[in-house]
Image (tube, helix red, strand yellow):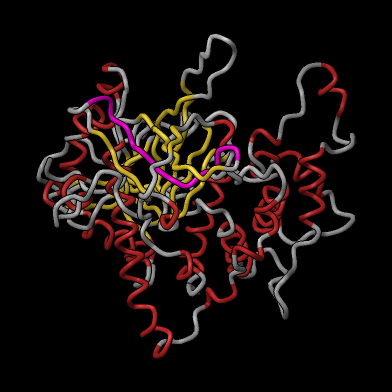
């Protein structure tokens, strides 16, 4: 299908309200609305919208926002609706894809016909899935850092990035610093935090109860666990040496600190897809059924996240998996992930079956991310010799991140909650980063389909 390359995923029901950016317009001058991560709107007056591509609109947004050249790599244009998300390539024509939107929904979602007929995408300026985390810390422009911060904050608050309570509080404390200024002992800080608690913490950490007892609690009552932890973390936020002590001062330090903390989440910067997995058999009738999941794919690997419980079920780096997909023409659309496991002390191969109409999109994105990583690895030795030292060197290694090793951490795999196909094939093992059933032709699947 022409003009459908990109990444796709379905946002949850709590996503932004239904909006339109590129609906029916003619060849004359038109206003295009581009939404930023903080929900502000950039209106663009353009000529001949139907023929404009994403690269041209991207340039127009950068000019209005006065962003530096690095923004071309950092951000991409996305078409987003409550049913589907698609990252556009520079050559794509947003107007054309907007007209094809019902076809994309029918192909890549299970949405009812009535929802498909009513759905219309908005054009959003978001982080590029293919921009490496290590390059973010080399950015100095405050507006670019702010936009990255706003997007990461939105994903944390919406629980699209599952976080442990301690990490939610640390991230929320930085949001307090940005929005309320430095912590001032003796000031009515607790009241200010309590009144906007859902601006700092995910909703599930803001629940305080309802009814008479909640009303009697009042402003002077003791803070709840999440609220108190947030206040404790807020008072520990360090200020930059030699300034940045006023609310109107540069906030780059705190944006960068928020991003650095977000980078510890293994699914930061990912594209989201929706599907289902089999539940483990329960009871003497062996009834398992299926559970909804979100599949988060980034340059680092694949994470399968429980949609309801907001914790990771399976996390794999690309070196640890093989994959393939079956198309709807063959049978139900499925993404297969294979990885090494252990069954009562015996090494086994494990297969996870993810049911999703977006299986071919996920398969293509995995392949493309692996290709990008291999290209980067080949170029790395030359960059080490001739290039300046990377700001990413200040990032802690995975061995230095104890918060991700906490017992019961939401980012640790929960294989006991998954139903996998375990088998042993003597004398044969699958090389990781390969397809389960051989390889495609020389043309990248991502190039052809996404």
**Magenta stretch containing residue 285, yes or no?**
no
From the image, which quarter does the N terminus lie in? top left
Residue 379 picture location, percent across and down? 33, 78
In this picture, is 52 found above or below 313?
A: below
In this picture, is 11 found above or below 436?
A: above
Residue at figure coordinates x 39%, y 45% from the top left: 426
What is the residue that sits farthest to the bottom in this orientation? 386
- Residue 257 visible in the shown view: yes
Is residue 326 shown left or right of residue 392?
left
Residue 333 picture location, percent across and down? 28, 29
Residue 410 picture location, percent across and down? 63, 42
Instruction: Name the main secondary structure of what is drawn in magenta.
Output: strand
Is residue 269 shown left or right of residue 125?
right
Q: Which residues are magenta?
A: 331-344
Is residue 325 shown left or right of residue 164?
left
Q: Which one is in front, 225 or 402?
A: 402
């Amino acid at each position: 299908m022409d003009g459908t390359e990109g990444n796709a995923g379905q946002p949850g029901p709590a996503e932004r309200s239904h909006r339109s950016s590129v609906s029916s317009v003619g060849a004359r001058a038109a206003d295009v609305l581009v939404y930023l991560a903080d929900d502000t709107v950039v209106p663009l007056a353009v000529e001949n919208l139907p023929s404009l591509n994403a690269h041209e609109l991207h340039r127009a947004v950068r000019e209005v926002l006065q962003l530096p050249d690095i923004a071309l790599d950092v951000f991409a244009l996305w078409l987003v609706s409550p049913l589907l998300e698609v990252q556009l390539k520079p050559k794509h024509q947003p107007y054309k894809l907007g007209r094809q939107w019902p076809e994309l929904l029918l192909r890549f979602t299970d949405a009812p016909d009535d929802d498909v007929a009513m759905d219309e995408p908005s054009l959003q300026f978001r982080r590029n899935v293919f921009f490496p985390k290590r390059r973010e810390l080399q950015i100095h422009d405050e507006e670019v850092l702010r936009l990255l911060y706003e997007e990461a904050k939105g994903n944390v608050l919406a629980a699209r990035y599952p976080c442990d309570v301690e990490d939610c509080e640390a991230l929320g404390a930085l949001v307090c610093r940005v929005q309320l200024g430095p912590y001032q002992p003796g000031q009515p800080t607790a009241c200010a935090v309590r009144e906007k608690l859902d601006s700092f913490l995910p909703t599930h950490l803001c629940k305080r109860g309802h009814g008479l007892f909640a009303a009697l609690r009042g402003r002077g009552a003791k803070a709840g666990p999440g609220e108190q932890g947030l206040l404790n973390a807020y008072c520990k936020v360090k200020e930059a040496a030699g300034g940045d002590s006023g609310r109107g001062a540069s906030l780059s330090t705190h944006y960068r600190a928020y991003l650095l903390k977000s980078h510890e989440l293994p699914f930061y910067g990912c594209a989201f897809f929706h599907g289902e997995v089999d539940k483990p058999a329960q009871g003497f009738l062996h009834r398992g059924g299926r559970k909804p999941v979100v599949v988060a794919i980034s340059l680092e690997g694949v994470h399968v996240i429980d949609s309801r419980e907001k914790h990771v079920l399976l996390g794999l780096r690309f070196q640890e998996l093989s994959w393939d997909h079956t198309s709807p023409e063959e049978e139900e659309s499925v993404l297969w992930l294979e990885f090494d496991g252990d069954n009562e002390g015996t090494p086994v191969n494990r297969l996870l079956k993810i049911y999703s109409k977006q299986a071919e999109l996920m398969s293509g994105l995995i392949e493309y991310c692996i290709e990008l990583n291999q290209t980067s690895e080949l170029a790395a030795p030359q960059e080490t010799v001739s290039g300046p030292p990377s700001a990413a060197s200040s990032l802690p290694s995975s061995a230095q991140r104890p918060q991700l090793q906490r017992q019961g951490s939401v980012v640790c795999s929960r294989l006991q909650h998954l139903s996998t196909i375990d088998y042993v094939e003597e004398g044969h093992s699958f090389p990781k980063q390969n397809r389960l059933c051989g390889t495609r032709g020389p043309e990248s699947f991502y190039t052809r389909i996404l």
